[in-house]
Amino acid sequence: MNDKPQPVSLTIMGKEYKIACAVDGQNDLIQSAQQLDRQMRQMRDSGKVAGADRIAVMAALNLAHELQLMKSQNATLNQSLSECLAKMTHKIENVLENQ
């Protein structure tokens, strides 16, 4: 497999960017750029944020906040799963010991 980064052309807010990316990561990069473009356009169109730099920073903050929420939810789910698996393991060990 070719792991050498290949250029990917992305368009964000009407500007084209060429980014080198491994072939197996290109779809994720394109989807990320599309998500960023959508969010930046929504902010621009709302009229609440002016200037490309401010729009980019606000979009980045929104996406970083969303990522942080997802990480927190993931940690909570992992903790719940670990507790559930520990309980199941304990029950299975009890059943096996009492046979």
Image (spheres, rainbow, N blue to C red):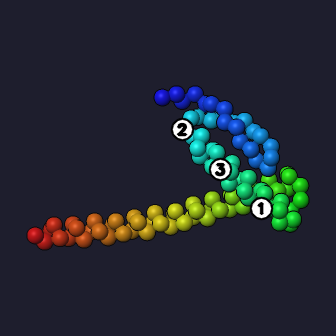
| Residue at the extreme left of the image, as rendered | 99
Mark 2 and 1 residues: CB-CB less than 8 Å, in contact?
no
Badge nearest the viewer, 2 or 1: 1
Badge nearest the viewer, 3 or 1: 1
Q: Secondary structure at mark 2?
A: helix
- Label 3 neighbourhood size at 10 Å, few (<14), some (14-19), many (20+)? few
Q: CA distance from mark 3 to mark 1?
A: 15 Å
Q: Quadrant of residue 88?
A: bottom left
Mark 2 and mark 1 lie on one chain; the one further toward the N terminus is 2
Q: Amino acid at mark 3?
A: Ser
Q: Is residue 2 above or below residue 45?
A: above
Q: Quadrant of residue 68?
A: bottom right
Q: Is residue 96 above or below residue 24?
A: below
Q: Amino acid at mark 2?
A: Asp
Question: Residue 10, position in %: x, y?
Answer: 71, 42
Question: Residue 4, position in %: x, y?
Answer: 58, 28
The answer to whether residue 57 is seen in the rendering is: no
Q: Which residue is mark 1?
A: 42
Mark 3 and mark 2 lie on one chain; the one further toward the N terminus is 2
Residue 59 is left or right of residue 88, and the answer is right
Q: The C terminus lies in which quarter of the figure? A: bottom left
Q: Which residue is mark 3?
A: 32
Image mark for residue 24: 2
